[in-house]
Image (tube, rainbow, N blue to C red):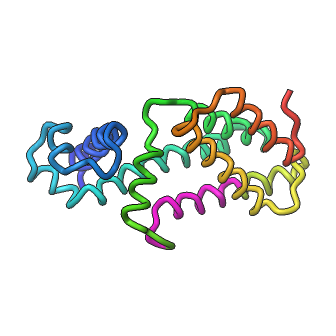
Amino acid sequence: MGDKSLQKRKYIVEKARGVFYKNGYRAVTMKDIVEACEISRGGLYLYFTNTKELFEAVLEEEHADVDTVLEEAGNQDSTPGERMLMYLDGQKRAILKKKDNLTAATYEYLFENKASGKNNPVKKQFDKSAAALERLITEGVRQEWMVCEDASEAARNILYTLEGLRVSAQTTGVTAETVDREIAYIMGTLGMIIK
């Protein structure tokens, strides 16, 4: 794909993201995307064949943003503890941000498509994020910034906690204090104290 095609695809994904955010997953049609992008139906079908494929591209872009946070935290000249705090702070901002949250649409997509195992883009991302967090925790233990006997299990528990907060933010609501308390708990389980 050339630069112009990549830019057009990215544009479509960004516009679709807003449509999915506003309408959920189930209610969105290709016609909705055509209207949001102000392109022809044929122009859209050059890039995506259906809303499922398009939503998966939106999810991929969302996950790339999360990966970027972990990578940027890792590339900075900082301790593992500081990188963990940077990551958790980014997650807190995402959880508390009411705008641009695709949690409800993602669950609609999962229930409708019953994607499992290798075909589940959310599971793939979870596993990828868990591996990145596991590496960070392992490094933190090695450098004596953290205490943890099972970095793999700790990484997964952190992600489950964050996902629970995301769902709560969309259903019952959570406060910044609640998220801070959970982050402090996560840090405490790793032997780190936030002051």
Q: Nearer the viewer, residue 42 or 156?
A: 156
- Residue 150 in percent (x, y) is at 83, 63
Image quarter in which the C terminus is found: top right
- Which residue is painted at 23% across and 44% down in the image? 8
Image quarter in which the N terminus is found: bottom left
- Residue 9 in percent (x, y) is at 26, 48
- Which residue is painted at 22% across and 57% down in the image? 48
- Residue 103 in percent (x, y) is at 47, 45
From the viewer's perspective, tell me whether residue 6 is left or right of residue 162.
left
- Which residue is painted at 78% across and 53% down in the image? 137
Residue 114 quadrant: bottom left
From the viewer's perspective, tell me whether residue 79 is left or right of residue 125.
right
The magenta segment is 118-133
Q: Nearer the viewer, residue 58 or 171?
A: 171
Q: Nearer the viewer, residue 98 or 68?
A: 98
Instruction: Identify the residue at the far bottom of this view.
Output: 117
Q: Nearer the viewer, residue 77 or 8?
A: 8
- Residue 140 in percent (x, y) is at 82, 50
Vertical arrangement, residue 57 with respect to residue 88, above or below: below
- Which residue is painted at 9% across and 53% down in the image? 42
Query: For the image shown, how many numbered marks are present on the structure?
Result: 0
| Prevalent SS, magenta region | helix
Q: Is residue 181 magenta?
A: no
Residue 157 quadrant: bottom right
From the viewer's perspective, tell me whether residue 16 is left or right of residue 93.
left
